[in-house]
Image: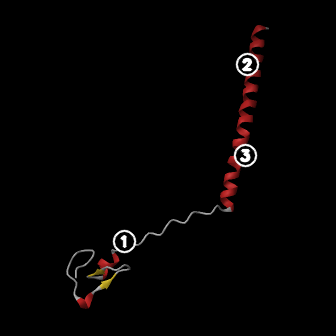
Amino acid sequence: MQCAFCGRPIEPNSTWKGSGDQFYCSEFCADSEAPEEAAPVPAQPTLLDHHLKRPYERLQQLLPHMRAYSGKTLAAARVRATLGQIA
């Protein structure tokens, strides 16, 4: 029998069994066994996520109105400046 990690022969009296069906020659080789990866758990939205996301949703709703308003004020300022130059 050989070590699943390093390939050395294993003595029957000093065998280490890993979490799977593999055997190792020492504790160090057994510890080097890669842990089984669990499936990622999808994160549940929390109340904090909701409160952090909410202002951005509101901003997305208001942004077109703010741009339209700022465009109107800039246009009005240009008209006033033009009229001021003519007079």
| Residue at the image position 70 percent from the left and 51 percent from the top | 54
Which type of secondary structure does the marked residue at label 2 adopt? helix
Q: CA distance from mark 1 to mark 3?
A: 47 Å
Quadrant of the snapshot with the N terminus: bottom left
State which mark lies toward you, 1 or 2: 1
Q: Residues within 10 Å of mark 2 (few under 14, many from 20)?
A: few
Numbered mark located on residue 69 in the image: none
Q: Secondary structure at mark 3?
A: helix
Image quadrant for the C terminus?
Answer: top right
Image quadrant where residue 15 sits:
bottom left
- State the residue position of label 2: 78
Q: Earlier in the sequence, mark 1 or mark 3?
A: 1
Residue ID at (27%, 74%) = 5
Q: Residue furthest right?
A: 87
Where is residue 80 drawn, in percent x and y?
A: 78, 17
Amino acid at pointer 2: Arg
**How far across and how far down the image is residue 35, in percent?**
40, 72
Q: Which residue is mark 1?
A: 34
Circle 3 residue:
58
Q: Earlier in the sequence, mark 3 or mark 2?
A: 3
CA distance for labels 1 and 2: 69 Å
Q: Residue at x 33, y 74 (%)?
A: 32
The image's colour scheme reads secondary structure
Near mark 3 (Cα within 10 A), the count class, few <14, some 14-19 or many ≥20, is: few
Query: Residue drawn at (69%, 42%), measured in percent from left and top?
Result: 60
- Extreme bottom residue here? 13
